[in-house]
Image: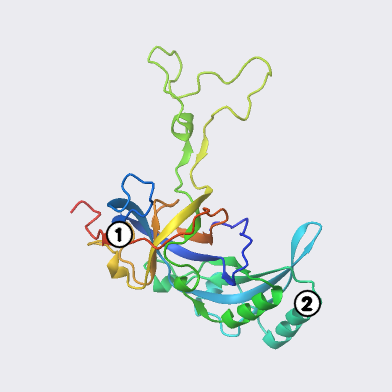
Amino acid sequence: VARVRAWPEDTSLGLQGFLGYKAGMTHIFVVDEKKTSPTAGQEVCVPATAIETPPLFVCCIKLYGSDTHGLKALTEVWAKDLPKDISRALNPPKRYDPQKAMEKAESLIKEGKVTDLRVLVCTQPRLSNVPKKKPDLAEIRVSGDSIEKRWEYCKQLLGKEVSVDQVFKEGEYVDVISITKGKGFQGPVKRWGVKILSRKQDDVKRKVGALGPWTPPRIMWTVPGPGQTGYHQRTELNKQILKIGKDGKEVTPSGGFLRYGPIKSSYVLVAGSTPGPAKRLIHLRRAIRPPKTAPAPPTITYISTSSKQGA
């Protein structure tokens, strides 16, 4: 599960992220809205990634304060009725008094000790086509003008489900954070793309030509070498949301997505590719460095539902 290390400074009230499972890729036709583009006003083919986004359940509100070392967890408020599958991921608190926890949190807010608010959400894989029951947990920051407004918003969400259309809109730019496809231990040719040596080389050919100079008398960290390839966390900025839908049949190709199957719940179409294989958990975050121009919802004329299995 990818960890979000930074959140945008946004004054609009709402969640700043959402979770989904990567289903696969397809292609669509949209009208090019860029006025300076050579194909302005014409239909263009755009590759798109389908991400299944079943509703998230808000399990807990977490309150943070700040000190010399950064953010520090002060307290948390759990929902009364949690999903049954939550015990597969963690041990829910027992003999818990939510009213007492709520009073403690409000007293900290009145004293001005709270500097940030986040909610702990869990996915619901049973509602998707991912073959597992254990939910994935993640913290999502709540943005807003003041701590008081953000606190009231969090109390409304606690113990309820949140859908993707409550967080994002069509045409909006998001950042995609995920874990790439793992490839194991690989050599420098596959890992870094160095040139394969000529056939006259006495030693092996799939290696680095020189490990470095005599001075300094050591191998620098910049020299391409073998090692772990893939299965790294990566963040791709400014991916446009092309479509948000509730019926997965609209984008599911005949025969289902390769190594995933049909989309059962709501979905998001994101322009371009996203890191990771099918079934990987994808974290969508509000763009931390959005473009200056305001995004506009794209005009989609065609979504390909042809088979992706060569049939």
In the image: residue 218, left or right of residue 204: right
Residue type, label 1: Phe
Q: How many neighbours does mark 2 have within 10 angstroms: few (below 14), some (14-19), or many (20 or more)?
A: some
Q: Position of residue 31 (x, y in %)?
A: 31, 56
Mark pair 1, 2: CA separation: 49 Å
Image position of 143 with respect to 275: above or below: below
Residue ID for mark 1 = 257
Give the side of residue 158 with respect to residue 19, left or right.
Answer: right
Q: Which residue is mark 2?
A: 108
Decide which of 286, 158 is in the foreground and name it: 286
- Depth order, front residue of 97/67: 67
Where is residue 283 drawn, in percent x and y?
51, 60
Q: Quadrant of residue 254?
A: bottom left
Instruction: Please report whichever mark, 1 or 2, sits nearer to the chain's N-terminal start.
Output: 2
* Quarter assignment of residue 92: bottom right
Residues at discs 1 and 2 in contact (Cβ within 8 Å):
no
Identify the residue at horizontal 40%, vertical 11% (top origin): 200
